[in-house]
């Protein structure tokens, strides 16, 4: 059954990447020199920066965020890493326990031990953090990534991305005011996959929607140093609690729906958040931004928020979060604590963020 489900995961996500590829077939794609002509580098933290927006965090911000812990409640925001979970493209999680037991015995007490062996796109599977080396743009000078670094640079290799590695962000970590935007409550139900390019589409969150949700929830406006997360309800197709109770056929159906598109932030919302100098954004979906017809959001370009936030501005992204507990408790602001793993030269990181409120 596991083998069968792994095929379902791959096919469901490959339908997405296949459609993206088909949509570009026959086009002559010129280099995009906007990163060069619009001076996306150096960043506001200087030409040597490798961490991005987390640089905004100050001791005062941390102390202020800590005051949001009032009930002593804790919610973990990561999902379970397992082989039959949805994944993008050909990505997957494959884990075995070698030997059973892996080693031993030791001594008269006959002690044995188990290890796990994991084969995965470790930074880009399940609950995942997108770091500096994840998203780039093809320019006439090469593949441009955050702060003007190119994968053609000598210190960027297939064995580690050097100055684009996630460990540089992990050195600082995230301790911030977390803000939950409850799109399910705002929409009076789970947000749908967009069917148009209009900002008024119920599957696209605009700048105006962010302001309306903040006002509706009775919290302070989004501000510098915040970490902002969108609860769409779409993540429940990959249900955080009930997944293992579904049949193989039910999982196949849910994976296909989960991967077919997603509600999320539109470009206007991403620019709005960037202007307010947040340090992290994310959602309960696989990409955090709106993915509708042709895989665009407010515009035809696919994944334009990723480019705007990560490549251009160094504002990193957390995907496939479990925000259900926060939404259930109406915990719209909280202390958020998390750091990527220090994977030298990695594109991103798995993890299990923590909210305290």
Image (cartoon, rainbow, N blue to C red):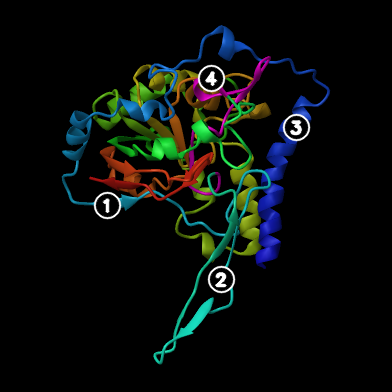
Q: Is residue 87 above or below residue 221?
A: below
10 Å crowding of disc 1: few (<14), some (14-19), many (20+): some
Dot 4 or dot 1, earlier in sequence: 1
10 Å crowding of disc 3: few (<14), some (14-19), many (20+): few
Instruction: Name the residue beneath numbered marker 3.
Output: 21
Q: Is 166 situated left or right of 27 in this image? A: left
Give the quarter of the figure containing the N terminus: bottom right
How much space separates mark 3 and mark 1, taking CA atoms?
42 Å
Dot 2 or dot 1, earlier in sequence: 1
Disc marking residue 74:
1
Residue 191: horizontal and vertical position, in percent? 49, 36
10 Å crowding of disc 2: few (<14), some (14-19), many (20+): few
In reply to whether residue 49 is colored magenta, the answer given is: no
Taking the spot 31% from the left edge, 27% from the top edge, the residue there is 214
Q: Would you identify the image quadrant in which residue 187 lies?
A: top left
Dot 3 or dot 1, earlier in sequence: 3
Instruction: Name the residue beneath numbered marker 4.
Output: 148
The residues colored magenta run: 124-149
SS under mark 4: helix
Mark closer to the observer (2, 3): 2
SS under mark 2: loop
Q: Is 228 situated left or right of 69 in this image? A: right
Marks 4,3: beta carbons within 8 A:
no
């Amino acid at each position: 059954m596991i083998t069968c489900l792994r095929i379902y995961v791959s096919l469901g996500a490959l339908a997405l990447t296949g459609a993206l590829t088909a949509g570009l077939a026959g086009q002559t794609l010129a280099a995009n020199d906007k990163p060069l002509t619009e001076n996306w580098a150096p960043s506001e933290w200087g030409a040597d920066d490798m961490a991005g927006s987390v640089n905004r965090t100050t001791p005062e911000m941390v102390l202020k965020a800590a005051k949001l812990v009032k009930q002593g409640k804790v919610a973990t925001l990561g999902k379970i890493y397992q082989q039959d979970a949805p994944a993008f493209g050909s990505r997957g999680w494959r884990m075995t326990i070698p030997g059973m037991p892996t080693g031993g015995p030791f001594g008269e007490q006959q002690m044995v031990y188990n290890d796990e062996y994991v084969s995965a796109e470790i930074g880009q599977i399940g609950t995942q953090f997108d770091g500096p080396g994840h998203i780039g743009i093809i320019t006439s000078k090469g593949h441009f990534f955050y702060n003007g670094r190119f994968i053609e640079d000598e210190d960027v290799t297939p064995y580690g991305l050097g100055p684009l590695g996630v460990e540089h962000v992990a050195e600082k970590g995230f301790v911030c005011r977390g803000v939950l935007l409850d799109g399910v409550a705002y929409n009076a139900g789970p947000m749908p996959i967009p069917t148009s390019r209009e900002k008024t589409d119920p599957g696209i969150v605009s700048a105006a929607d962010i302001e309306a949700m903040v006002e509706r929830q009775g919290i302070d406006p989004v501000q510098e140093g915040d970490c902002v997360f969108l609860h769409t309800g779409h993540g429940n197709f990959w249900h955080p609690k009930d997944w293992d109770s579904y049949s193989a056929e039910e999982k196949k159906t849910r994976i296909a729906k989960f991967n077919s598109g997603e509600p999320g932030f539109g470009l206007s919302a991403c620019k709005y958040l960037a202007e307010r100098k947040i340090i992290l954004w994310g959602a309960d979906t696989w990409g955090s931004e709106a993915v509708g017809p042709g895989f665009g959001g407010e515009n035809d370009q696919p994944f334009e928020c990723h480019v705007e936030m990560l490549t251009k501005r160094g504002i990193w992204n957390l995907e496939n979060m479990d925000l259900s507990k926060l939404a259930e408790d109406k915990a719209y602001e909280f202390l958020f604590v998390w750091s990527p793993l220090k994977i030298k030269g990695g594109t991103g990181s798995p993890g299990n963020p923590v909210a305290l409120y």
